Image (cartoon, grey):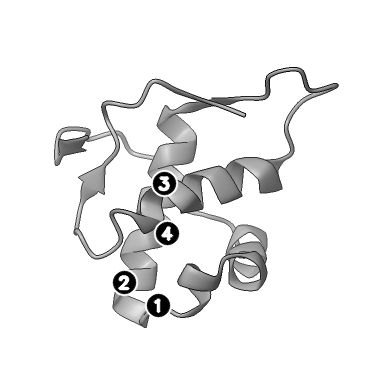
Amino acid sequence: MGLFKSRAVVAPLSETDRKFLLEWSVPYSEMTAAIKSEFEDQVAHFLATQRITGVSFEGALEREDKLLVAASACTLSAGWPRFRWTDVTEVLL
C-alpha cells in the first residue's frame, strides 16, 4: 500500500455508481458525508488504476462487480485522506 504517491486524475463516480454502492455496500451507506466523499474518490481511483480480472468467467466482469471489489478494498482505507492503493497491480476473481 502506498500513501499519497499517485497523482492520477480520474473521473468521479457517476450518480449510478453512487446509488449502486448505497444499496449494495453497507459500509458505504453508513459513512458520514465527509468520509463518503473521500471514499468515492478512492474507489474511482482504484477503478481507474487497478486491473480487476475474472478468472474462469464467461464474458467480461460487469461494472457492478468491479465497483464492489474496489469498495471492498477502499473500505480498509476509508478515513485516510488522499490514500491511494498503489502496490496492487491486479485483483483476480
Q: Earlier in the sequence, mark 3 or mark 4?
A: 4
Q: Earlier in the sequence, mark 2 or mark 3?
A: 2
Q: Where is mark 2, residue-wise?
A: 35
Q: Secondary structure at mark 4?
A: helix
Of 73 and 60, the residue lying toward us: 73
Crowd class of label 3 (few under 14; some 14 to 19; many from 20; radius 10 Å):
some
Q: Earlier in the sequence, mark 1 or mark 4?
A: 1
> In the rendered image of this protein, does residue 33 appear above or below residue 89?
below
The percent coordinates of residue 59 (x first, y second) are 83, 22
Q: Earlier in the sequence, mark 2 or mark 4?
A: 2
Q: Where is mark 3, residue-wise?
A: 73
Q: Where is mark 4, residue-wise?
A: 40
Q: Secondary structure at mark 3?
A: helix
Kindly identify the residue that appears in the image at 22 percent across and 33 percent down: 6
Q: CA distance from mark 3 to mark 4?
A: 12 Å
Q: Of tags 2 and 3, which is closer to the observer?
A: 3
The percent coordinates of residue 45 (x first, y second) are 39, 42
Check contact, mark 1 vs mark 4: CB within 8 A. Answer: no
Q: CA distance from mark 1 to mark 2?
A: 6 Å
Check contact, mark 1 vs mark 2: CB within 8 A. Answer: yes
Tag 4: amino acid:
Glu
Tag 1: amino acid:
Met
The percent coordinates of residue 86 (x first, y second) are 27, 30
Q: Earlier in the sequence, mark 3 or mark 1?
A: 1
Tag 2: amino acid:
Ile
Q: Where is mark 1, residue-wise?
A: 31
Picture disc at residue 39: none
Q: Secondary structure at mark 1?
A: loop
Q: Quadrant of residue 56?
A: top right
As drawn, the residue found furthest toward the right would be 58
